[in-house]
Image (cartoon, helix red, strand yellow):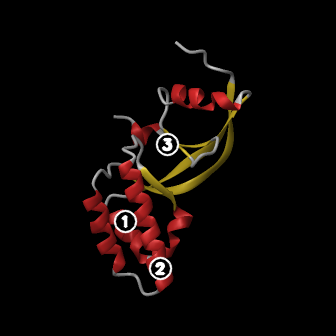
Amino acid sequence: MQDIPAFKLVFTEQREHLLLPNVTSVKVVQHLYDVLFQYAITEDYEEKLKAFIAKMEAHIKTKARTPFAMPLTDLEFLEDGLEELRLLNWMQEKLTTFEVVVDEPEKLETVLETMEAYFTFNRIAETNQILVFPQKITAY
């Protein structure tokens, strides 16, 4: 067993997110696009919708064990489409971001692998920040 270096979690922020816990099919994403496209009245809206769908497809392809989630503020462009998402079983929940501080930056991956055994999170891009999901959402 490898040694786990000392680390600490530093609270960064807590924001409202919309999340869909069990999206596993690209077909679901395509259907969602069709539903939300009816609200596309501007090119800007359509571009943002395509970016949203692309993020969801990328999430599915990673086979992540976390729900797909996006900050509510990033989805405000959907306007009436937000209600469509709620009708399609999307949940609104506060998710928390932490910075993972490690004395030896090269040990960050070891720390993240260890933490995966204890709680559910997504790493934010290639940073040392994680987005943590409430246990009530991810507990089976």
Dot 3 falls on a residue whose secondary structure is loop
Q: Which mark is residue 63?
A: none
Image point (32%, 62%), residue name: 29
The Cα atoms of the two marked residues, 3 and 2, are separated by: 28 Å
Category of crowding for the residue at label 3, using alpha-carbon neighbours closer than 10 angstroms: few (below 14), some (14–19), many (at least 20) = many
Residue 35 is left or right of residue 110, and the answer is left
Q: Earlier in the sequence, mark 3 or mark 2?
A: 2
The amino acid at mark 3 is Phe
Residue 20 place in picture, x, y as percent:
37, 54
Residue 11 place in picture, x, y as percent:
68, 41
Question: Dot 3 corresponds to which residue?
Answer: 133
Q: Earlier in the sequence, mark 1 or mark 2?
A: 2
Up/down of 15 relative to 127, above or below: below
- Look at the numbered discs 1 and 3 and tell me whether their residues touch, using CB distance below 8 Å: no
The amino acid at mark 1 is Leu
Image point (66%, 30%), residue name: 106
- Look at the numbered discs 1 and 2 and tell me whether their residues touch, using CB distance below 8 Å: no
The Cα atoms of the two marked residues, 1 and 3, are separated by: 19 Å
**Front-most of 16 and 27?**
27
Residue 106 is left or right of residue 22, and the answer is right
Front position among marks 1 and 2: 2
The Cα atoms of the two marked residues, 1 and 2, are separated by: 16 Å
Category of crowding for the residue at label 2, using alpha-carbon neighbours closer than 10 angstroms: few (below 14), some (14–19), many (at least 20) = some
**Residue 53 image-quadrant placement:** bottom left
The amino acid at mark 2 is Tyr
Outermost top residue: 1
Q: Earlier in the sequence, mark 1 or mark 3?
A: 1
Residue 44 is left or right of residue 103, and the answer is left
Question: Dot 2 corresponds to which residue?
Answer: 45
Question: Dot 1 corresponds to which residue?
Answer: 85
Dot 1 falls on a residue whose secondary structure is helix
Image point (33%, 81%), residue name: 38
